[in-house]
Structure formats: structure tokens, C-alpha cells
Image (spheres, rainbow, N blue to C red):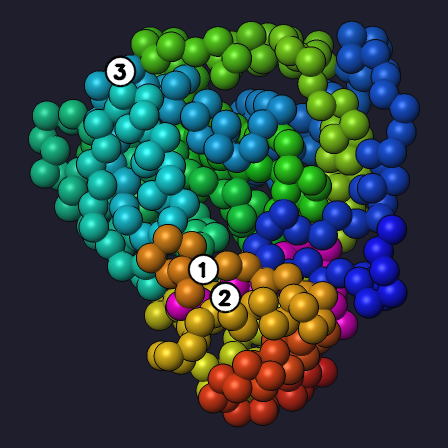
Amino acid sequence: MPTANEFKSGRHFLQIPGPSNVPDRVLRAIDQPTIDHRGPEFAALTLEILDRLKTLFGTRSHVVMYPSSGTGAWEAALVNTLSPGDRVLAFDNGQFATLWCGVAQRLGLEVVFEPGDWREAVDPVAVEQRLREDQNHTIKAVMVVHNETSTGVVSPIAEIRRAIDRSGHPALYLVDTVSSLGSMEFRHDDWGADVTVCGSQKGMMLPPGIGFNAIGEKAIRASETAKMSKAYWDWAPIIKNNEHGFFPYTPSTNLLYGLCESLTMLMEEGLDHVFARHHRLAEATRHAVAGWGLEILCRNPANASDSLTAVIVPDGYDADDIRKIILERFDLSLGVGLGQLAGNVFRIGHLGDLNDLTLAGTLAGVEMGLAIAQVPHEKNGVTAALDYLAQTT
């Protein structure tokens, strides 16, 4: 049992960019007796979920699920569409783009990893140019992270699709939406993704444990000739079993209860309203950062994330020290700087189950933490955010 000075009243503020807060409705849904995953009740649950997932991903094609993290969904996208030694094109614009490339390399793929700036989005012009240079079409896939969780920078997925098309290149288009789906607009079909990767623990408001692939027809055709070794990750038996509401493995039944409820919540609010809410709260956060006289990592405001904001700390100060103070004093968790950003930024997550007052409390904790850490800043951040929230709906 905790001693008196270890006990903290109130609810912990989990404001990292995922896993995000799990709503009470979802927690109650998960807390049900497990049912027979070969029975008719489970089949009905699965078919209902798969139908709603198509709406969320913006696709009329297949969405498959794995008991996995997003990393597993990365691997599934690669092994189902490619063959050993295939070349894939990726861009160095953040830690998760880098990690996905690492998975590809360990699987025996050749990664053409174009240098980039972690403060900028993937440039469609650069994609088109690189593919035009590949006149023999040795590049088999383009890998892009929609919302780079380490930086808070969004890449223009639809524009990149148009760039691929202009190049006349047949490469597959693989897109990571782990920290954007359910928080920001994404349209698998309309934006021309061939495989979309996601995980359950961010915009879907669930614990980690479900990985997703939305699969277009071109990717299905590629999977029929792909030679990468696969067993657990193989799409074909999952799609076949899903036709009747079942899986070729033991599914995460109770997480599926929660997924059904979270999808219900998203549809009740309306996806357009969900995206507008996230944009408004993100704008309030950006007003706060400007009010503090600090800078966000994303250089181009048009590419700023609606899921998270990475804040640059002034020279001579350690972002992790600031985060530690905020956690200890206010029971508020902020995201750590990853990779080359370690110690230089902290990340404010504003995705999933949150509202104006949740964000206001978060920003107040950050502003007090900056003062305690003696970080040079203006004391206008919270006021700027509250003024923005009061003036907008």
C-alpha cells in the first residue's frame, strides 16, 4: 500500500501521444466475460466491427486485425506484398519512419532511405523525382508515415499519391496512420493508399494490442505473388475466416469488445466532428506554445499535427528534466523526445478522449512546470489557449 506522501488524489493526466486515455465506456465494455470465439455471438461482433472499420479507414476493401502492436502491422504490410531483396523507398522525417525502415531491413528488404528534415513533411516533389529516376522500376513500394508521432509533422498523403501517379511508377503505397486514424481525416480509397497500417492505442482510444491493415485491391494482387516468408501475418487465411466473422488464430476477444464500443463512440460523435474537435484542441495548444514564446518543432504550420505538438525547449535546458518536474508535481505525463530529438523536445498529446477542460488542465500543468524549471518563457500560454477555446466552437 502507498504511504500518505506517495498517494496522489485525482486522476492521472496521460497526455503522451499514445497510448491515449481509455474512456470509461470502453473500459466497461472490455470488462465483460469472455465468450466463445467460435460461436455465433462472436461472429456477429466481428462482422459489426469490420463493417465500422471500413468507415473509419475510408475503404470498401478489406481491413484485417491482429493481436499485435502497430509494429506487427508494419511487418504484416511488408511480408504480404513484397519478396526478399525487393527495394522500398522511404524518407527520413522522424523516428517512426526510421523504425519502420529498420523492420524492412531486418526482413531482408533493401531500403532506399532518402535523407530528410525532421521538422518537415515528406515532399511529394521528392517522391516523384526519386521514382522517375528509377526507370527500371526496381522500387516495389513507397513507405510514408502520415502523422509522425515523434515530431508532430503531417505528410500530405493524397498529394504523394498524385506524385506517384505522375511518375508513372507502379510501386505500392504503404501508409502508417498509427497516430492519425480516428483523430485526423484519412481516406484509404480516395487518397490512393494500397496498405494502411494502424494500431488500437491512439485515436481508437483502446489499450495497445490490436494491429490493423487496410488492404486495397492492388495490394491483394501483390500478395498473390509475394515471396516473403509469413505464417501468422498472412492476410489470406484472415480474410477467408473473416467472411464468417472468425479468425485463424485466437483473437483478443475483450479488446474487440472495447473496439466495438470505441467505434460506436466515434460514429455517435460523427467523424467530421471528431476531426474538428481534434483540430480545435490542437490549435489551442499551438496558441499556448506561442503564448509561452516557445517554438513547435513542425516548421510549416500547414503540416502541424492535430494529434500532438512537439515543443522545442530553449538551449541549455533539458526537456526530460522539465517532464520529470511536471510528472512529479502535477501527475501529468508528457511525451519524451525520441531519437535525435532526445532532450530537445517534449510532446503534448491531444488525441483521443479529451475535451476543453482536459486540455486546459494539461496546459496549466505545463506552464507551471516551465516556471518551476526556470525555463525562460512568457506567462501567456494558458491565457492564449483559453481565449481561443472560448472564442471557437
Closest to the observer, 317 or 384: 317
Mark before the other along the chain sequence, 1 or 3 = 3
Q: Is residue 238 above or below residue 61?
A: above
Of helix, strand and loop, which one carries label 2?
helix
Residue 208 pos. (x, y %): 64, 37
Foreground label between 1 and 2: 2
Task: Give the residue pinned by disc 3.
Answer: 84
Magenta highlight on residue 4: no
Q: Is any part of residue 274 visible from this angle?
A: no
Q: Residue at x 57, y 37 (%)?
A: 199
Please say if the residues under marks 1 and 2 sit with CB atoms less than 8 Å apart.
yes
Q: Please state the extent of the stretch shown in magenta in the rendering.
A: 344-358
> Which badge, 1 or 2, comes first in the chain's sequence?
2
Dots 2, 3 in contact, CB < 8 A: no
Looking at the image, residue 383 lies above or below residue 52: below
Give the residue drawn at x 89%, y 29%.
Answer: 32
Q: Is residue 380 above or below residue 132?
A: below
Magenta stretch containing residue 351, yes or no?
yes
Q: Identity of the amino acid at label 1?
A: Gly
Q: Please state which of residues 257 and 277 is positioned toward the viewer in this rendering.
A: 257
Front-lying residue, 370 or 102: 370
Look at the numbered disc 1 and give the secondary structure of its residue.
loop
User: At x 24% / y 36%, what residue is drawn?
Assistant: 89
Comparing marks 1 and 3, which lies closer to the viewer? 1
Quadrant where the image shows the C terminus: bottom right
Residue 308 location, quadrant: bottom right
The residue beneath circle 2 is: 320
Residue at 81% x, 17% y is 42
